Amino acid sequence: MLKKIFSVSMAGVLALSLAACSSGGNTTASEAKYPERGITIVAPSGAGGGWDLTARSIAKTMSATKLIEEPITVENKPGGGGAVYMAEYATKEAENDYMMLVKSPPILINNNKAEGNSPYGYKDTTPLAQLTRDYGAIVVREDSKFQTLTDVLEAIKADPTAVTLAGGSAPGSMDHLVGILPAFEYGIDPKAVKYVSYDGGGEAVAALLGDNADVIATDASTIAEYVKSGDVRVLAVSSPERLEGELSEVPTFMEEGIDAEFTIWRGIFGPKNMSDNAKEYWSTKLEEMSKTEEWKQELEQNGWQSEYKDAAGFEEYLQTQEKVIVELLTALDMQK
Amino acid sequence: MNTIQFLMDGFGIAFQWQNILFAFVGVLIGTAVGVLPGIGPMSGVALLIPVTATLTAGLPTEAAAASSIILLAGVYYGAMYGGSTTSILLNTPGESSSVVTTLDGYQMAKQGRAGSALSIAAIGSFAAGIISLIGLVLLAEPLSNVALQFGPAEYFSLMLLGLAAVSGLAGKSMTKALMMTVFGLMLGTIGIDAVSGIARFTYDIPVLYSGLEFLTIAVGLFALGEVFKTVLERDHEDGTMAKIGRILPTRKDLKESAAPIMRGSFLGFFIGVLPGAGATLASFFSYIGEKKFSKTPEQFGKGAIAGVAGPEAANNAASGGAMIPLLTLGIPGSGTTAILMGALIMYNIQPGPLLFDDHPEVAWGLIASMFVGNLMLLVLNMPLVKVFAKIIQTPKKYLLPIIIAISFFGVYAVQYTTFDLYLLLACGVLGYLLTRNDFPVAPLVLALVLGPMIENNMRRALTISNGDFSTFVTNPISLALLIVAAAWLLVPLLLKLKGRSVVLNEEG
């Protein structure tokens, strides 16, 4: 309801600013001047999820620091794990410099998996920047017989039916890939691994604590509290280097002899045919934003790790990540 | 002793003037959110998070966290109170958990007993709120451990029990009820299967990937179905809609509701504790149970007050129960509690095993404020009954467009897609055709909720057991639930075979 009121008032502001522009009569300057009206950032999910929070944090920081003076509205477009809006974004909004999109690895995964496929991937957008990162964690109960990641992998290798791996999302999505990645690199047939999917990370943790799963794959940022309370142990994290804070004692996949890493990144994208003007504008503003105190505060409040990559670096990174994902999906027989 | 001390400290926090104000604003917005279909508790809470963050900006972190969670939780349980209003008056469920309230609530309103229905819903919600809070205070610790023991096998058996009990929602014909159940189960399979990741019946249409939205279907079948019926059958009964007799329930109403409210409260509380089960199931179970317990089951569906009192108590108690896994385990049992959890994390307060040790003032302040908030809701809702009840006296020619507008607005506010608007319309037509031919729609709706849960949990259980079906009977809780489910179906049959005259199903 508040949102409705908010967007109505936004529309009012927009109309006024448009009127102001047209009275100026400098139509030739439209090439050089960006932005000249309000901007929308879309979270392709319902309110409250990770994409939504990221989009709102960007909008809030940009306005609070006055980096972008024009109003920024956040819109929720849920459906199909992001695939529904992706189709619209890649086609109808391909020329619209005023629509931005927040996404994470599913933009790669959905585009490459056979089932629930989204025909559009990151190549149908203009990647602008990576802003945050999180990592996967392999977690067992405190009293588990497994002491290291290798113990788990050996047990699966010996008898895949004896170890239940659980995660908070469907097969072929992030938790599954994080859990399967070490097994795959260890030479285990990933299809043989017994994976049980739950509705969200919380239910997966409940399954682990209630002894309905032996191992779970989940986000490193959310599991720390259970480590602190002594209910679970984290065997390995998917980061390239050790994490800070509660999980600083936990080895990485690399340290455990598994040559793999997996980052759960979140970034912001522009439309496919974004004008150079707009792209440059966003690149500068996003880089400036990532250095502000306000942004750092947002990150801390949400428990996110900062990792800034500019447009070029982000695109390059997406290319390599896409390879990893295609390789994994292929091994799982789930690729497009 | 310790618990009492903590609770008293909690009341100390809840009675600070700004927190009383926050609780009041929370329950007030919650009531509005509950009354308006579409803006469910989930989006209501999510949209208020930034507002509370601004309001509490001046306070120290701990106090700010306590104040804003008091407001947000107020919205959550306030919405549970308000959700019944449109169900009773307009046959338009505002939340999925108040779908079942339409069955008897709307009938009561038609008979001019809207006042009784609304006030018994408020009284039932209040009683349930208090009972579940006492449960929360006393049983949080042991129950959170029991909830963890509920694995896929137990969930499967619990859901199966729910499905076995679907006969309780049948109208004139059991066969038709079963047909609708199967139809609901089939609709539930649309979307990306959560266990294998395979897309089923989606025909590469992305909007189907996440399945059909439950609320769209329920609003279409119930509210629009009723609208179409009135329009198509030229049902201009402006004068025949009974006058609203009295606002307060009669002594007889209260007597008939007392036991259902108690049963609904306990049932709702325990189902609410289980992550993922939730208020919708609790209200359905309560309704079915009340029909079974009732001495006059033939009254159900025709305006039995127990059919309003029980489910309303159950869905409110479930929201109290759902606080247990949230606060003690950090596991949100529903979409709304997940957002409440996000709000706490924003203040660097992590719900979970350490919450009661690390931040007792937040946890106990919240619990104490819920006692205060529930009392406020009762005081707030009783006078409103009179105002709301007037709605039903609005002439049909004004009322119908309002219902249509509310349905469309509500569904769009949840889903943001035009696809759901078409689906809503289609369900409206379907709802009309089905009801006209005596196909009950409630079993369809229940099956749509239960279907995916039954299937996913069964397959999870079988994956864990490597395909061994005995997992469902070797597991004690699961076995007990299965026995109850079997008894539910078989006992009436056996009695009948023995020549005893029992009401197998209430024909007519």
Image (tube, coloured by chain):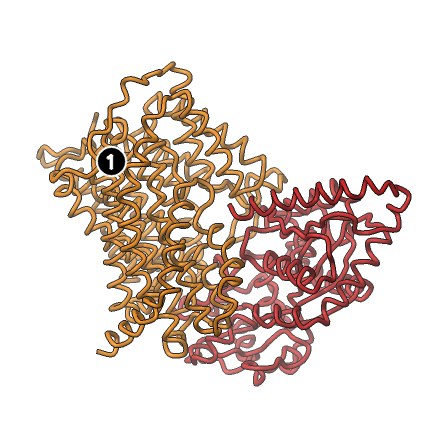
**From this viewpoint, is residue A207 visible?**
no
What residue is rendered at 82% in x and 40% in y? A23
- In the image, residue B107 above or below residue A310: above
Q: Quadrant of residue B121?
A: top left
Residue placed furthest toward the top: B234
Residue B175 position, x and y percent, is 30, 29
Residue A334 position, x and y percent, is 64, 54
Kind of residue at disc 1:
Gly
What residue is rendered at 24% in x and 25% in y? B243
Q: Which residue is mark 1?
A: B115
- In the image, residue A137 above or below residue B185: below
Q: Which one is in front, B495 or B399?
A: B399
Q: Quadrant of the C terminus of chain B?
A: top left
The number of discs equals 1
Q: Quadrant of the N terminus of chain B?
A: bottom left
**From this viewpoint, is residue A266 visible?**
yes
Q: Colour of chain B?
A: orange
Q: Which one is in front, B507 or A284?
A: A284
Is B482 displayed left or right of B411 in the figure?
left
Rendered red, the chain in question is A
Name the element at disc 1: helix
Crowd class of label 1 (few under 14; some 14 to 19; many from 20; radius 10 Å): many
Residue B232 position, x and y percent, is 41, 16
Is B348 displayed left or right of A311 in the figure?
left
Q: Quadrant of residue B170?
A: top left
Is B164 displayed left or right of B151 in the figure?
left
What residue is rendered at 46% in x and 64% in y? B341
Residue placed furthest toward the bottom: A249
Q: Which one is in front, B382 or B296?
A: B382
- In the image, residue B436 above or below residue A121: above
